Amino acid sequence: MKQFNVGIIGATGMVGQRFAILLENHPWFNVTTLAASPRSAGKSYKDAVGNRWAMPKPMPKALENIIIHDAVADMDKITKSVDFVFCAVDMNKDDTKALEDAYAKAECPVISNNSAHRGTEDVPMIVPEINPEHSQIIHAQRERLGTERGFIAVKSNCSIQSYVPALHPLMDYGVSKVLACTYQAISGAGKTFETWPEMVDNVIPFIGGEESKSELEPLKVWGTIEGDKIVDATAPSITTQCIRVPAADGHMAAVFVSFDKKPSIDEIKSRWADFAGEPQKLNLPSAPKKFLHYFEEENRPQTRLDRDAENGMAVSIGRLREDSQYDYKFVCLSHNTIRGAAGGAVLMAELLAAQGFMD
Ligand SMILES: NC(=O)c1ccc[n+]([C@@H]2O[C@H](COP(=O)([O-])OP(=O)(O)OC[C@H]3O[C@@H](n4cnc5c(N)ncnc54)[C@H](OP(=O)(O)O)[C@@H]3O)[C@@H](O)[C@H]2O)c1
């Protein structure tokens, strides 16, 4: 595979730091450029992050002394020096859209963790194991933007990353109704227990905007390309409650599901055991060998024991059983800043590179 020079926009933040760790020694992607807000611009990465480093591993040595660019003011310089960028910024929706549009129009593909463009009809929202074919909409998007290389592709919200993969291999049984309660880690808000001490010994029953994202985004992921847009799926009907819990990393979901044609427990388990997507078939560098791990133990998956399964890229499932009001219920878990954010974006970029969209 060709080598690509890449930039991280929002490099100083929680997701940006994850990109820095995940891309250290990446076989295809070489981080050459870092950018953030004017507050960080002009400082070395080490100084700009200071005591905000929240990763379990030290900052990669090769990045420590890179001088941070201003993501907006230095855009020309950045887009000329990299093949594409990963983007994870804490900006309002309009500014984020304007930033991502400007990079794409400057012929620099944007692999985004931000929500601003998730609803844009010709911007693919790709979970590589589920809808790799949605990348084909990039041709229509490039036509709209007037670009040859530039485009935007987005990651879904981290909240859906546990339950959508578990439901996907069951879709041909006619998944009709889903209720999901998510129990979400504090890193999902870009925080640690040091920066958010109120979360110690506490549960907060509200995460702004999360429930509508959790109910709508799966329908885009399961949607189909029609002409120059992605049209949302019309089923299943999904309702959610999203709750912040005192875990550092790892989003858990308690899921209830009904089907048009109810499968047996053994059929569900064998669908999960046998499931492999395009990343596994293509043997992409960040793909987990096995995407879905089912536990027979009744007290698994557990956040601390299982969030790092396959380097944080696998989804863990357990406690599948019959329910009195829905057909079945089960629990699932994914690492929110790895599979749910930076890791999922790196895998998406690998898929797009393998499909030729980064050439
Ligand atoms: N955390 C997660 O699990 C997760 C999961 C999925 C998606 N996301 C999304 O990813 C994005 C980043 O989240 P995060 O948790 O990493 O946030 P964060 O820790 O607060 O980091 C925000 C980043 O944005 C930069 N930034 C802020 N204002 C900027 C500006 N005006 N111009 C350029 N850069 C600016 C910050 O730079 P400075 O350091 O210079 O201020 C920092 O690098 C958000 O859109 C979030 O919704 C997060």
Image (cartoon, rainbow, N blue to C red):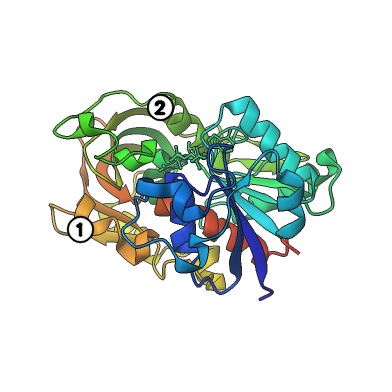
Residue 305 circle label: 1
Is 312 on the left-hand or right-hand side of 134? left
Disc 2, SS: helix
Residue hosting label 2: 211
Rendered position, 328 above or below 34: above
* Screen quadrant of the N terminus: bottom right
Rendered position, 195 above or below 316: above
Q: Residues within 10 Å of mark 2 (few under 14, many from 20)?
A: many
For badge 2, the amino acid type reads Glu
Q: Nearer the viewer, residue 311 or 134?
A: 311
Residue 301 location (% of width, % of height): 21, 53
Number of residue marks = 2
Distance, label 1 to label 2, CA atoms, is 27 Å
For badge 1, the amino acid type reads Leu
Check contact, mark 1 vs mark 2: CB within 8 A.
no
Is 19 on the left-hand or right-hand side of 154? left
* Screen quadrant of the C terminus: bottom right
The answer to whether residue 173 shows anywhere in this view is: no
Residue 135 location (% of width, % of height): 67, 52
The answer to whether residue 314 shows anywhere in this view is: yes
Q: Nearer the viewer, residue 255 or 57?
A: 57
Going from the N terminus, do you reach mark 1 or mark 2 first? 2
Residue 154 location (% of width, % of height): 59, 44
- The quadrant in which residue 80 appears is bottom right
Residue 25 location (% of width, % of height): 50, 72
Residue visible at 36% across and 64% down?
311
